[in-house]
Amino acid sequence: MTTVSTNTPIPTTPLHTPQPGMRLREIVFGAACAAAVRAAARLGVADALGETPATAAELAAEVNAEPAPLRRLLRALSCYGIFAETADGSFVHTDMSRLLREDDPNSLRYISLWCTEPWTWEVWPRLDDAVRSGTSVFPDVYGKGFFDYLHEDARESAQIFNRAMTTSSMQSALDVAELLDLAGVSEVADIGGGQGHVLASLLEKHPKVRGTLMDLPGVVARADARLRDGGALAGRTSIVAGDCREAIPVEADLYIIKNILEWDDESTRRTLRNVMASARPGARVVIIENLVDDTPSMRFTTAMDLLLLLNVGGAKHTKESLIGRMEDAGLIVGDISPVNGYLHAFECIVPS
């Protein structure tokens, strides 16, 4: 006779593919799933749940919530593989629920909060307006542009944005450093490089290479501690405050441009034009972006693409559209390589 441990997770998702009508019902209730993830992240449920099963009542005591509603929240999340319920009604971690822990090295807690911030619930219902006009609806909803709103009226949301971008950049930086071959490179420039996590990872891996981080003044002021005065890499690092859409006063053997060619076409053209104006013939330019025609991550990247349309009027690129922008700027496009499950690197050369 087979026995089942009371601590064994029980299946909470159907083993068959739902019929079209049910699948569409699930999709239109997608806001409930996103809201449930946000609630779990804000409550800190994943942090409260350790390596042993816990009941909803035990977790409720840890996160200052009511047991019955918390059990309903966990039951809903378990349907999507976020947490799992055991035969005796306790809850255990899954691979996805661990990603909501703050201490997980691949944590998506702040990304989950960022993508479900209060302003998102106001702009998503206006998607049809954005599709009709082809422009952002954010100024219509809030009376000002997206970034002005964040920094002037939603400072907590701006902090969430900064934490989310920092987490994402730190996680992808090691992937970029692992991918890029720096043979023959003495100087590398990270253009629009945020806090410089990619640059720091490259300099750590290649101790003879020097680097420059360029981004807006308020961004580089918060640069990775390894790059700033007193940091382990400061002696090989220059930090340049500036807007790459205006000028790129940096000369290097390798320029890295990661996830900044998505706001609008004019910004993309100006940035690439400025790289061409600064780079010496034969310099490498590596452009790293999400793609909306990359099959494994299309649900993720197409959703990001629509959110960009709503908040800033921007767009994620297809492989073809990005190559077109590079070639229009005069770059010679070479190999295209996956960085990880959601990023691609385009190797380019400045012609002689």
Image (cartoon, grey):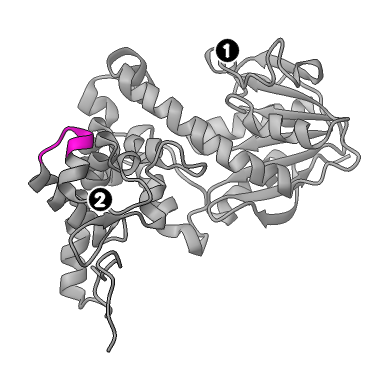
Q: Which residue is mark 1?
A: 221
Front residue of 253 and 237: 237
The residue positioned 65% from the left and 46% from the top of the image is: 175
Q: Which residue is mark 2?
A: 54
Quarter of the rendering containing residue 196: top right
Q: Is residue 86 left or right of residue 205?
A: left
Residue furthest to the right: 184
The residue positioned 44% from the left and 33% from the top of the image is: 164
The residue positioned 83% from the left and 41% from the top of the image is: 182
Quarter of the rendering containing residue 28: bottom left
- Magenta segment range? 61-66
The residue positioned 63% from the left and 39% from the top of the image is: 173
The amino acid type, in three-letter code, at marker 2 is Ala
Q: Is residue 330 left or right of residue 164?
A: right
**Residue 293 image position (x, y, % from top left):** 50, 59
The amino acid type, in three-letter code, at marker 1 is Ala
Element assignment for label 2: loop
Sequence-wise, the earlier of marks 1 and 2 is 2
**Residue 318 image position (x, y, % from top left):** 53, 54
Residue furthest to the bottom: 1
Q: Is residue 217 left or right of residue 59?
A: right
